[in-house]
Image (cartoon, grey):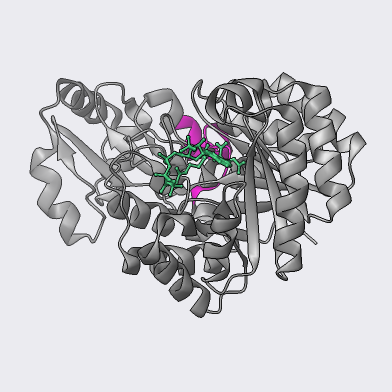
Amino acid sequence: MEDFYILDTTLRDGEQTPGVDFTMEEKLEIATMLDKAGVGVIEVGTPAMGQEEIQIIKKINDLGLKCELITWNRLSKSDIDSSIKTGIKNVHIGVPVSDIHIYNKLKKSREWIIETLKELVTYALDKGCKVSVGAEDASRADLDFLIEFYKTAESLGVCRVRYADTVGALDPFTVYENIKIIRSEINIDIDFHGHNDFGMATANALAACRAGAKYISATVNGIGERAGNTSLEEIVASLKYIGKYKTNFDMKQIPVLSKYVEKASGIKLSKNKPLVGEAVFSHESGIHVDGLLKDRRTYEFIDPTEIGRESEFVLGKTSGKASVKNAMEKLGMKLDDDKISKMLEKVRKGESLEKKKEPLKKLKYKVVGIFSGEIKLPFIFP
Ligand SMILES: CC(=O)SCCNC(=O)CCNC(=O)[C@H](O)C(C)(C)COP(=O)(O)OP(=O)(O)OC[C@H]1O[C@@H](n2cnc3c(N)ncnc32)[C@H](O)[C@@H]1OP(=O)(O)O
Ligand SMILES: O=C(O)CCC(=O)C(=O)O
């Protein structure tokens, strides 16, 4: 039993990112990689979109993955019928619950929501489906109504409910308070589905877990509507390393998953994207490199190899002598203090090490790249 499960929605909410359009091969590959990494559930898509989507979902189902697969549906019989055509009898029904959505988007009432929920959940259960229910825009819904909604869903026999912060309107304190209240009112599993509009999707998901949510919706690299969803790699790593939660998720799969989705989605990662950005385990400043050489934990909270990454040193404007000395030693050169200081001056001016590129390669050091006079060396601890 794990402390939490990832409900990955890269193929559903991730694909709702404007401009993202995964091919069938990419979807099959992403689903396979997610399963290998150890997610609990994959939300595979929205069958109501039509035949092509249904065919792709069928193929994902045919992969025979270990994890649970669910389809996304509106509060609509025809959506559920489309889902059943995929062969996956595990339907998620998304239901708007805030007054803005109920009255202005659906042009319905709270009473209609409760009655239609009863009708639709019963319809899906009667067709032999396992059912989970989502509360869309839960973060802006009236809390008493939301609880009535969840209690109704529970009494109907759904396996899990989702709390969706659809427009990323919450902070971690409110998420904690709300999920705690809901947790005390119902007994089925809660899935927290966060959006990153204010940069708090990961923190919000962490707070939801602390308050008792067992499932966390996430997407690889955090792709999704607007500023995206909770990013899978950030939440799984922060729950494991900061929260000390138990998980069987294979952290070493993170870089390969991230790179694959970066390419398939066409959404470029920034260099400093937590955990997966190119530069997040690079160190240049003198004090940091000196500290790292003495004890890696001074400036690295986790050992990057745990998540399939490597640290590296960069020589540049903010380097210090310890860093230059270490670099030269890696090149097999023992220099005295005076020479190291002179070399540091050159490094700071960005002129010295260009000529070392070839010897470094010969020494089989990974020359990661040379730009504006800097040279990156492999990070080898003494
Ligand atoms: C927060 C979220 O991520 S919600 C999920 C969003 N996902 C998607 O939109 C998936 C891709 N969507 C689609 O392919 C299409 O929108 C479809 C197939 C679902 C529907 O297409 P269309 O029939 O052309 O409807 P359209 O997209 O114009 O409008 C959506 C309709 O669904 C209704 N609707 C929206 N959410 C729900 C819901 N959860 N339950 C029931 N009805 C809903 C809207 O009120 C609107 O109905 P109306 O036409 O009677 O006003
Ligand atoms: O499943 C649901 O109800 C919520 C769907 C969603 O993606 C969201 O609200 O952001």
Q: Is there any visible trace of residue 40 in the rendered image?
A: no
Q: List x then y, in percent, for residue 248.
A: 67, 61
Q: Is residue 211 left or right of residue 294?
A: right
At x 57%, y 64%, the residue is 81
Asked if the stretch drawn in magenta spans residue 268, the answer is no
Q: Write down the region rendered in magenta.
A: 290-304
At x 10%, y 39%, the residue is 354
Quadrant position of the N terminus in the picture = bottom right
Q: List x then y, in percent, for residue 82.
A: 52, 63
Which image quarter has ligand 2?
top right
Q: Quadrant of residue 30?
A: bottom left
Q: Is residue 27 above or below residue 105?
A: below
Q: Nearer the viewer, residue 6 or 351?
A: 6
Q: Please state the total of marks drawn on the protein image.
A: 0
Asked if the stretch drawn in magenta spans residue 296, the answer is yes
Q: Nearer the viewer, residue 375 or 185?
A: 185
At x 46%, y 36%, the residue is 274
Q: What predominant SS class does the magenta segment belong to?
A: helix
At x 24%, y 46%, the residue is 333
Q: List x then y, in percent, for residue 373.
A: 13, 31
Q: Nearer the viewer, residue 185 or 86?
A: 86
Q: List x then y, in percent, for residue 157.
A: 84, 56
Q: Is residue 347 left or right of residue 107?
A: left
Q: Is there any visible trace of residue 297 in the rendered image?
A: yes
Q: Quadrant of residue 117?
A: top right
